[in-house]
Amino acid sequence: MVRVAVDALGGDHAPDEVVAGAALAAGGGVTPVLYGPPGLATAGLELVETESAIAMDEHAVEAVRTKPDSSLVRAVRAVAEGQADAVVSAGSTGAMLAAALLHLKRLPGVHRPGIAVVIPSRRGPTVLIDAGANADARPEHLLQFAHMGALFAQELLGVSEPEVGLLSIGEEAEKGSQLALAAHELLRASGLRFQGNTEGRWLLEGAVDVVVADGFTGNVALKTLEGTIRTLLGLLREELESSPRGRLGGLLIRPAAARLRARLDPDSYGGAYLLGLRGLVVIAHGSSSRVAIANAIRLAARGVEQRLVERLGERLAEGVLASARPTTTTDDK
């Protein structure tokens, strides 16, 4: 059984939707364990009582240090102490990152953890990394993200030889910021199946299996995609319900529309891995529904079953990321 620690107070719809999502995910080898206040209605799931919560608007590092008995921190500590195999939270991304760095630590050789999220595309699932952990990054960080994203695509998406692209403002090698230009050179010499730059307009086409970006660019791209998909699906529904003819047409295309929604719905995966740590961390969207929470918990369990953290550690030990290890500076310690 895979034990997944779940922050019951994380997210816009906590705790009700979180508890309901955990209940949906329970079974089939998955045991969600809720971390929340005494007296919480748990739908029969195990509860570890905690004393406080970390709000979305709190300073992440300070909150993690001053609220060691918060639901988020206790859930992360459960993985560090071996009481759980993975942790899921829809709470503050900054607090999750801070708590994970404090209690789980980075894998040897990893300079910055990166958020790896699966986005839908015409060709199939695509990994976007980093999707928000590092607003500022250096070229060697992007090189590490590429290696971690490629491993993710291999181990969890079943892509034998993932193609990697660098998110930039043009496909030509000479286009992009100074960061993109320098990262392009490192990726070209990395041994990965680097396909060069890819533009935002190709993300939903699935031009590559792994899209690499700094956290600022990646997060903007991700939220733009999510908002666009939700708006388009909503507009389609409005048009189909706006007239008798539209409603008739809606009945005819309902099966196809349902399949399209399933392919594009961000809730289908539910969360994103925070890769590069000594434990498995899944970050769910703050507005996650119970379906998204359930899928985030299942995603965490899959990562445990596929030994994602161990495989990444083995790849590091094999020296695959050796070229991505920058010289440690005082501010990185």
Image (spheres, rainbow, N blue to C red):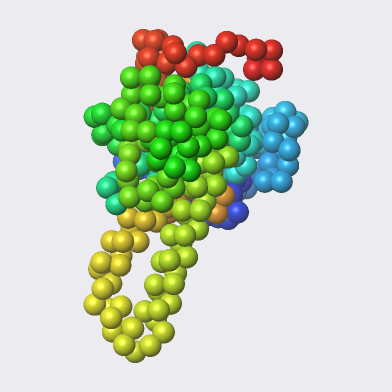
Q: Is residue 134 left or right of residue 85?
A: right
What residue lies at 39% left-to-right and 47% top-to-bottom?
A: 203
Please tell me whether residue 247 is drawn above or below residue 90 in the rendered image.
below
Q: Residue at x 60, y 11 (%)?
A: 328
Residue 215 at x, y = what percent? 55, 36
Classify residue 254 as left or right of residue 239.
left
Q: Give the camera-side residue of 230 and 178.
A: 178
Quadrant location of the C terminus in the rendered image: top right
* Residue name at image x 42 percent, y 16 percent: 321
Percent of width and height locating residue 104:
55, 22
Query: In the image, is 276 to the left or to the right of 330?
Result: left
- Report if residue 303 is visible in the image: no
Screen quadrant of the N terminus: top left
Please name whichever residue, 169 or 27, is drawn nearer the observer in this view of the structure.
Answer: 169
Of residues 243 and 69, the one drawn nearer to the viewer in this rendering: 243
Most distant residue in the bottom direction:
244
Give how far across and how far down residue 69 sits, in percent. 68, 32
User: In which image quadrant can residue 244 be found?
Assistant: bottom left
Viewer-side residue, 256 vs 47:
256
Q: Which residue is drawn at the image coordinates 41% and 37% (left, top)?
A: 172
